[in-house]
Amino acid sequence: MVSPVLTSSDVLDGAASSPAALRRFLHGLPGVDQVGCEARAATLSTRSIKTTSKAWALDLAVSMIDLTTLEGQDTIGKVRALCAKAKRPDPEDPSCPRVAAICVYPDMVATAKAALGSSGVHVASVATAFPSGRSTLDVKLQDTEDAVAAGADEIDMVIDRGAFLSGDFSRVFDEIVAVKQVCRRSTGQDAHLKVIMEAGELVTYDNVRRASWLSMLAGADFIKTSTGKVQPAATMPVTLIMLEAVRDFREATGRMVGVKPAGGISTSKDAIKYLVMVNETAGDDWLDPEWFRFGASRLLNDLLMQRTKMTTGRYSGPDYFTLD
Amino acid sequence: MPSDTRLDVRKTYKLYIGGKFPRSESGRSYVVNDSRGRFLANAAAASRKDARDAVVAARKAFPGWSGATAYNRGQVLYRVAEVMEGRRDQFADEVVAGEGLTRARAGRSVDQAIDRLVWYAGWTDKIAQVVGATNPVAGPYFDFSIPEPTGVVAVLAPQQSSLLGLVSVVAPVVAGGNTAVVTSSRDRPLPAISFAEVLATSDVPGGVVNILTGSVGDTAPWLASHMDVNAIDLTGVAGDDEHATALEVAAVDNLKRVRRAPDAEPDWTLDPGLSRITSFLETKTVWHPIGV
């Protein structure tokens, strides 16, 4: 087990009090041992999960999916169809859990909200000039406001990677704080804020660790690996670093933050590897749709195929599930 | 170093899935003896997960192979025959060892296998003329029927004839535009592996033919019940009524095309006719308005 990065909340006091203090804090985080991190992630991929544990893991993974459609060609019809699938992923099997959320662009939030009704499936909306985040703060805030006003339960924002990479951490920090403010609702039902690091553009594991801490300090409810629009997207080592960060953050502050790997997780096998990693890194408190999500679209069908295999005893095929 | 002390370079016989040669997922292997019971080699014993992977590979290869022109498929099959011709001696050795034939008879058997590939290569762009039709209808329409491939076909290759029999059941399936998951003869798998090496080096896209060695009982039930397999050829369980019936029952769930097991393994040297191609073709009939 890797030892915690921070052990007391003292270090965190005033970490974000000034741009210089923030930079000092983030650069003071211990560097990630690249080889060790990759080896650890690879070891965690070798666990054998079978029979009842596998059935449990498959259902848990289904219930953790943020079923995503983020294409220029999205239509109202497609979003409605996806919502129907979110509510009852396998129409032939009532015991199949529903997914956690539908993830769409802001203009589709109202459609998704209406289609999902009181089913309990959340609506997540990307915002802040997703996926590049290259726009003015005003536009980003307006983007978020629109999504919140349309009823989004969760907001997936992107950080300004340009500012982050050029060392302007406080700009990134202030932006997250401002977006978080816009997520508030007078009813008290605030939209949950997920902050996307876009690990593929941060280049190094050290940067992923810094961006994770920065986001959590700024008030993120979830940290998310990637937009899914940039390769590499979610990888095991990156998610491992983020899981360590949320674990240590709770240790230091008592506040729990969720993790969402997104992009490139398409098989049940992969999903189960991630669940093993969550359990062994952050702990089983995170084995809950409230604290861990998969951003995925293809993954769901593979999970359903595996579930069908386990209940019928024969291999299923893609012909028997909807194409999204 | 004197030449007579050269170390043996022994070959590892592996499976052929998706254009690659993996070991069995299960890690199991089994001993292959020659026709007189002497040790010949260790071969991979395919498991149900290998069968599953093979089906995934075959499904992935299907759009490309079925979408290729019939002429192109014919060229590729002819190329397989060309490459086999170059390895004629190796195949003859393996047939001699496995089937206990004389050298001369084994050679003839290899020649026939190569000729059969050429024969089926010729049929790829001719079968549509023979089994397709333009149909006279009582209305202002062109009406024509054309054969289309069935999809992913599980082929249980014959247990006795390890090369000629194998080629005789695989070639017609892929000539029609299907992709295949083949279980080879259990006791005589070596020609099947060498055939896989030929396929891998002769323009056949990976996944079009996948070859599993080992006991039919380990993989066939999973292929028969697999919902993503469209047809199954039961030739490999010829004479074993109980097993064949169980596989037919398992194949019912997704209404697979089933080519039933014969009472005994056929004489592969005879003219095969077209039935092995047409067993795995579906007829599509199109009505097209005249004058539009």
Image (tube, coloured by chain):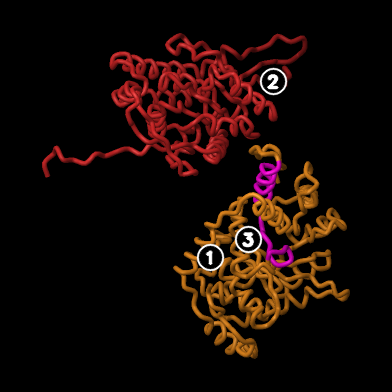
Q: Which chain is red?
A: B
Residue position for label 1: A237
Q: Chain of mark 1?
A: A
Q: Which of the two labelled residues, at mark 1 and mark 3, occupies the earlier sequence position?
A: 1
Write down the quadrant of residue B246 in the picture. top right
Write down the quadrant of residue A148 in the picture. bottom right
Numbered tag placed on residue B286 in the rendering: 2
Residue position for label 3: A275
Mark 1 lies on a secondary structure that is helix
Give the magenta-colored segment's residue range: A287-311
Residue closest to the eye, B232 or A48: A48
Q: CA distance from mark 3 to mark 2?
A: 50 Å
Mark 2 lies on a secondary structure that is strand
Write down the quadrant of residue A116 in the picture. bottom right
Residue A72 visible to the viewer: no
Q: Along the horizontal axis of the image, is A47 left or right of A186?
A: left
